[in-house]
Image (tube, rainbow, N blue to C red):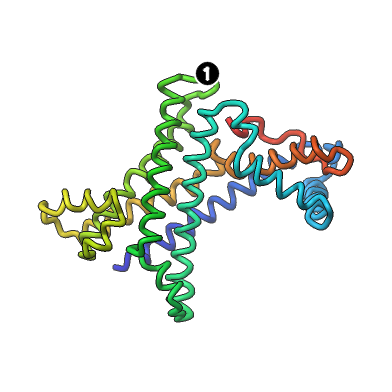
Amino acid sequence: MDRLAIFWPMIALATVVFLVGSGWNVAVWLQGAVHGDPRLSPWRKLWLLLGDVAGVLFSRRLWPAIQATVRDALLHRRLQQTSLLRWAAHISLLSSLGALFALSLLTGFCQEILHGIFGVNHPLVLAIMNKDNPVIALSNEILNLVACLGLGLVVYRRWGRREAQLLNAAPDLATLALVATLLVSGYPLESFRLLAENVPPAQAAYSFIGYPLALALRPLGWPWLTVHFWAFLFHAAVAAALIAYLPFSKFWHVFASPLIAVANTLQEELPAHTPVVLDDLWREVGR
C-alpha cells in the first residue's frame, strides 16, 4: 500500500480537528469586550475586529503594522528584553518548527499538486521535490537541529533552572513529548530513507546527521523499504497528533501571541488611531 494513501487522510483529519479547535478558541475570545462593549453578539464583535484589521491594511498605518509584526511577532522584541534565555528557546524551537512545516508544505505542494496532478516538470519544481537536493537536504537537517537545540533549552528551563512560571502539568508535558518525538524521529527516518533508496554518498552526505547514522545502521541488513514505510507512518502519526492537539494546548500562543503583540505595539505607538482588541484574550499567551 502506498504510504501517502495513509498519510494524506491522516493529515486531513488532523487539520479538521485543528480548525474546529481554532474556531472554539476564537469563540471563547469573542466573549470578551470589543470596542469597550462586551454585550455585542459574537458575530458583531468579529465583524468589528475584521473592520479594524482592514482599517490598518488600507491606511498609512500599514507600514507601522508591518514593522511591529517583524519586531514583535517574528523577532519577539519584548520577550528578548524580558529574558534572553526564554527568547532563545522560543525563537529557536518555534521558528524552526514553523520553517520545517512550511518547507514540508512546499515540498508536498510541488510533488502532489504541481507535479502529480498538473504534470509540471519545471526544474525548480523537480529540485524542491528532490529530498537529496543540497539546499533541501541541508535546510531540513539544519532546521531540525536548531529545533532540537531549542527543545533542549525548553527542557533546561523546566527541569534545569526550574523557572517558577513553568508548570509541568500533563497537557504541557504531552505537547513537549509530541514535539520531542517528532524531532528525534526525523533523523532515523531520514537514515532509513537513504538506505531504502540507496542514495549515493555524494548526495546523502548533505544529510550530515542522517547519513552517518545510516552508515552505522547499514550492517544490520534490515529490510529498509519496510522499515522506512513504518517509520514514515509513525512520524506522520506524531505530526498529525501534534497538529490536532495544538488548539487545545498552550502551544496555541504560537498563533495568538503575534496578533496580541502587534496590537499592543500599535496601541502604544499610534494610540489615536489603533483598534481596540479583545480585552479578555488568553492571559497565558507567551508563557
**152 relative position to 229: left or right:** right
Q: Name the image quarter holding the N terminus.
A: bottom left
Q: Is 279 in front, or is 138?
A: 138
- Name the residue rendered at 39%, 40% in the picture: 148
Q: Is 70 in front, or is 151?
A: 70
Percent of width and height locating residue 79: 61, 32
Q: Name the image quarter holding the C terminus.
A: top right
Percent of width and height locating residue 4: 37, 65
- Name the residue rendered at 32%, 51% in the picture: 234
- Name the residue rendered at 10%, 52% in the picture: 219
Is residue 150 among what the camera can see? yes
- Residue 243's place in the image compared with 133, above or below, is above
Residue holding disc 1: 164
Q: Is 140 in front, or is 235?
A: 140
Instruction: State the SS at label 1.
Output: loop
Q: How many marks?
A: 1
For the residue carrying disc 1, how many other residues have a C-alpha within 10 Å: few (<14), some (14-19), or many (20+)? few
**56 relative position to 119: left or right:** right
- Residue 73's place in the image compared with 205, above or below, is above
At label 1, the amino acid type is Ala
- Residue 93's place in the image compared with 224, above or below, is above
Percent of width and height locating residue 8: 43, 63
- Name the residue rendered at 83%, 37% in the picture: 38
Percent of width and height locating residue 286: 60, 33
